[in-house]
Image: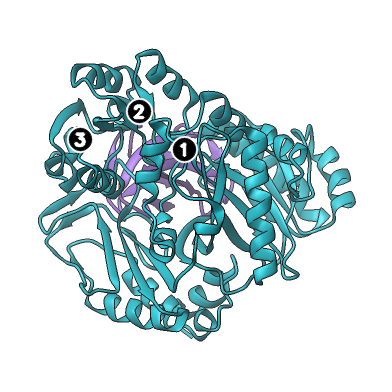
Amino acid sequence: MTEIKASMAGSVWKITVAGGDKVESDQDVVILESMKMEIPIAAETDGTVKELKVAEGDFVNEGDVIAIIE
Amino acid sequence: MINKILIANRGEIAARVIRTCKELNIDTVAVYSEADQKAPFVSMADESFLLGPPRVQDSYLNVEKIISIAKEAKVDAIHPGYGFLSENGVFAEKCEQAGIRFIGPSAEVIEEMGSKIAAREAMENAGVPVVPGTDGAVASSDEAIEIARDIGYPIMLKASAGGGGIGMQVVNTEQELTKAFESNSKRARTFFGDGAMFMEKKLDHARHIEIQLLADSHGNAIHLFERECSIQRRNQKVVEEAPSSFISNEIRQKMGETAVKAAKALEYVNAGTIEFLVDKEENFYFLEMNTRIQVEHPVTEEITGLDIVEAQIRIAEGRELSISQSDVKMDGHAIEVRIYAEDPVTFFPSPGHISAFELPEGEHIRNEYAVTDDYDVTPYYDPMIGKLIAKGTDRSEAITFLKEALSTYKIEGIKTNIAMLKAVVEHDQFKSGNTTTAFIETYYLPMTKPN
């Protein structure tokens, strides 16, 4: 089980997967937006999206858990 | 005559435009979002109007609201600054329809230069060299492979609708190309709703050198020499200087003349900038044209003694340029660094509360800034919170003044890139003028990794 964490403070602009989806390593899971910069956050390993901890529009701080991959 | 201007922008550039208006005895109107109520530019203006909530769609991109405020405040003209609505042809047209002058070129030129493909075509027609590459969208990764065989690796893949480095990738081999094409096209579709891709030859050790233009509505056009803006992170400029320490006088003159020729062919009016990539052999190629004032315009003002915002306003009034090409003289050397609210290593934004803010001072130092010593930097806008400009009689003196100024620049409460700027200006490769677009990854980033 791995946690995907926010690498910067900002809002969740887009979620590109749903709970239960299979993801591959390097696949974008969410796109964060802050200060005109959109940062795609990718899965680090292959697996299944066990849980999404955020919704589109949420504000996250650096280090917050975004999703859990199993 | 223009007697009252609304500035449809925020931050340091709004403050910068207001300053020149005050010198010209022009009344100013600031518009601001709920997030910017305490920003310096708001209190500097003669009048200020709230646009709405922080998000740009509800505030600085809200065309209807901005125009209705402009009418209510009875302004003669709108200065769009950079970013936001500055390169939006529809906005320029709506201003004119409302009887308000848009301080910039015509809507047609804005649209033409805003399309990467149309701009490339227009420049080729005007006799301006362009980077070898495709004239239209590439249909598939198979077609991309064929084209790449023709123009040679490395190539740069770019999303037609792209910006901010998204959908852009350097590809070195045919093996990488299929995957890179598909992933960037997919990403461009997610981000911009358009997956169209085009390709250009990637120039190695290239420099980003741009020519500042002024053109009036009577057909006169001049250039104010070049700015070198090669040092970039995330494909955005960080350090800019004038003149370039790289190009020869002969190339300087040739680039200037080429840019003026292009401005005339486009029937361009107002201030504008043509950006070029320049290779090791000093061959230069058109990159894009910015139809507005640039962030880095102060370095040109410092070496020429001209006020580009004033020129923009006079041109918008329909006046002829007050100077000709031979009147434009270069004196000394100026360097600008952009102060960003961001992590100095990852370059990720760092919004938060500024608890202390002290600027360096001195006769060789110019500050442009957007914040105060008790200020919330919000996540809604660009991370640039200030610009520091140093001017010397030559490049090495400018570097010395800049280094001193950076050592006393104080911002507390948020992360900034000041540590990075210090490392860059103190680097031997910077001092020796080896400022290519690969500078950050080649010289700076390795310094930040332990061992």
The image shows residue B387, relative to residue B428, as above or below, that is: above
Report how far apart the C-alphas of labels 2 and 1 lie in the structure: 31 Å
Circle nearer the N terminus (2, 1)? 2
Report how far apart the C-alphas of labels 2 and 3 lie in the structure: 19 Å
Chain under numbered label 2: B
Q: Choose between B37 and A61: the one closer to the eye.
A: B37
Q: Is the same chain shared between marks 2 and 3?
A: yes
Label 1 sits on residue: B320
Residue drawn at (54%, 82%), measured in percent from left and top? Answer: B429
Residue B24 numbered tag: none
Residue B61 numbered tag: 2
Colouring scheme, one of rainbow, by chain, secondary structure, one colour: by chain
Residue B49, located in which quarter of the rendered image? top left
Label 3 sits on residue: B28
Q: Tell me the amino acid under the disc marked 1.
A: Glu
In the rendered image, residue A21, in percent from the top left (x then y), is placed at: 52, 34
Circle nearer the N terminus (1, 3)? 3
Residue B46, located in which quarter of the rendered image? top left
Circle nearer the N terminus (2, 3)? 3
Q: Is the same chain shared between marks 1 and 3?
A: yes
Q: Residues within 10 Å of mark 1 (few under 14, many from 20)?
A: some
In the rendered image, residue B137, in percent from the top left (x then y), is placed at: 74, 33
In the rendered image, residue B309, in percent from the top left (x then y), is placed at: 36, 45
Chain under numbered label 1: B
| Chain letter of the purple region | A
Horizontal side of residue B121 vs A32, given as left or right: right
Residue drawn at (38%, 20%), measured in percent from left and top? Answer: B95
Question: What tint does the image give chain B?
Answer: cyan
